[in-house]
Image (cartoon, rainbow, N blue to C red):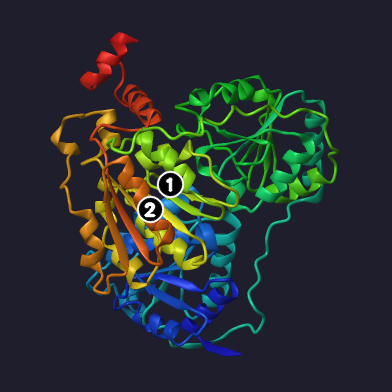
Amino acid sequence: MRMQIGAYLARRLVEAGISHLFGVPGDFNLSFLEQVEADASLTFVGNCNELNAAYAADGYARTSGLCGLVTTFGVGDLGAISGIAGAYAERVPFVHITGIPPLHAVEGRALLHHTLGDGGYGNIGRCMAEYTVAQARLTPENAVEEIDRVLQTCWRERRPVHLQLPADITHLNIEVPEEPFRFALPQGDAEQVALAAGHIATRLAAARSPVMILDSDADRFGVAGQIAVLAERCAIPCVAAAPAKAVLDETAPYYLGGYVGGASRPDIRELVSQSDCVIGVGLRFTELNTGFFTHEIRPEVFINLQAHDVSLAGRSIPAAPVGAVLEALLAQVTPSSRTLPARPADSAASLPGEAADRLTHATLWPRVARFLKEGDVVVGEAGTSNTALLGTPFPRNSHYISQPIWGAIGYTLPALFGSQLGSPDRRHLLFIGDGSFQLTAQELSTILRHDQKPIIFLLNNRGYTIERLILGEHSRYNDIANWRYADLPRAFDREDRALSLVVETVSDLEQALKQAEQADRAVFIEVLLPEMDAPDALKRFGMVVADYDYGPQGPRNASMKTSAKKG
């Protein structure tokens, strides 16, 4: 059968499960967007800029599956590239489609707008190749093969891919297959899978004190359910690195809490360091996962279940995908008589602070913990919010979105929009600092334009607090303009579809939470906090970062020097 190339691409996207494309229109992608408009199964969602569109695609993919990102050549691609790189680092899959100049212009090296004016058209593709796992420039001759190859790679690796679609070929007819697109997921080699599962089963049977450490692959490759069954059946305590927050049910008896190497809770730190069988699930030894490399995991007891292979005490077993290995492992293991470690008792039922007290992080986050409910999607911005939320217990069936590896500030507001677009029936809560908000603030207008109803907590402590804690406590480079944040929803939306509140005391917050619980519209709560107030964990983090980044002779905050002398 014959189809137009752009229509065939749209068809393949739909067959791959994609229903939404985020992006910004530009003259080189308009011919394709016309075909998207004509396809009832696809929806193009316009964003305020390409970076925000990439962040929105990332957020959507984390809760709702594959989606697309559409930009125009050059300026649009490079505007989006930080968001694409972040998705690569965090292993989040989406399909980036860029409309490029017509093929005759590319081949003729024409000097066009949105280029460097030097006749070169390979530069953008070379940039994107660093941050995507598959790339192709489509032509009438290669479109059928390349579209399928790139889509397959996107899902297999759970990372972004890049397709260049020349503006003058979208409406050309080519011969295409009638068969629908199907993902061919790697099953591995049966003998290798059995070998890996057998080794792990033997180790578990002999272990006195096993433990599992989850990283984001447990979520990205959909194996959290298998891990939960294994943990229950074999009485294996589980802890989560920061990227795997809320991947498991945090109320389950086998879940102990977060793991950050030597900065972990003492019982978790001891459990991991003394364990005779440590099973990682896609565990990456980043500085944040390991508390700046203070983890104590003996190499001879460490097993890492990775996307497509298993590392067993340093020996690699290839062609052994994590899902297949867990399935084979579950078929072998039998219930264990081990006793799970007890978790520390919950804190006192009473909340800290009096009604008239000025809000601090110590009084804010316990009330946030009580406000969360089952099924929430919680989005935590890098810095203060993420640090506090990592230590906050979540209800069952919660989902947490953050960006602990790439750590781009401003990521979470557009990511909130993307996630809520894909999962509109779930309550979404965003916690974002004032400095981060200023980077992508305009996407609040997109949230309101789509009549979304999130609850947004804007933590206003008048600047980059996480940076102040590292260095420059009183330096002007950490200052920002103090906007009237609570006025912005009304400025961005003529329909007044948001409830805006400003809170400064404990009583203010409690009243605002009651209003948010009852509101049937977006809620924007500006939370006024003292400038240098922060969760204790973030204060410790700031000192560690300064030591690591600047060395023993490097600059320090005066308050840090004082603390060191007291210690």
Examine the rendering and report whether any part of residue 207 can be seen: yes
Q: In 3D space, how far apart are the residues under numbered discs 2 and 1 (Cα atoms)?
A: 8 Å
Q: Which mark is nearer the camera, 2 or 1?
A: 2
Is residue 161 visible in the rendered image? The answer is: no
Q: Which residue is mark 2?
A: 412
Q: Which mark is residue 403?
A: 1
Q: Position of residue 213 (x, y in %)?
A: 61, 35
Q: Which mark is residue 105?
A: none
Q: Secondary structure at mark 1?
A: loop
**Is 136 displayed left or right of 250 in the figure?**
left
- Near mark 1 (Cα within 10 A), the count class, few <14, some 14-19 or many ≥20, is many
Vertical arrangement, residue 44 with respect to residue 396, above or below:
below
Q: Secondary structure at mark 2?
A: helix
N-terminal of the two: label 2 or label 1? Answer: 1
> Is residue 382 placed above or below 220 in the rendered structure?
above
Amino acid identity at mark 2: Thr
Left/right of residue 332 with respect to residue 289 in the rendered view: right
Residue 278 rendering spot, x and y as whole percentages: 67, 29
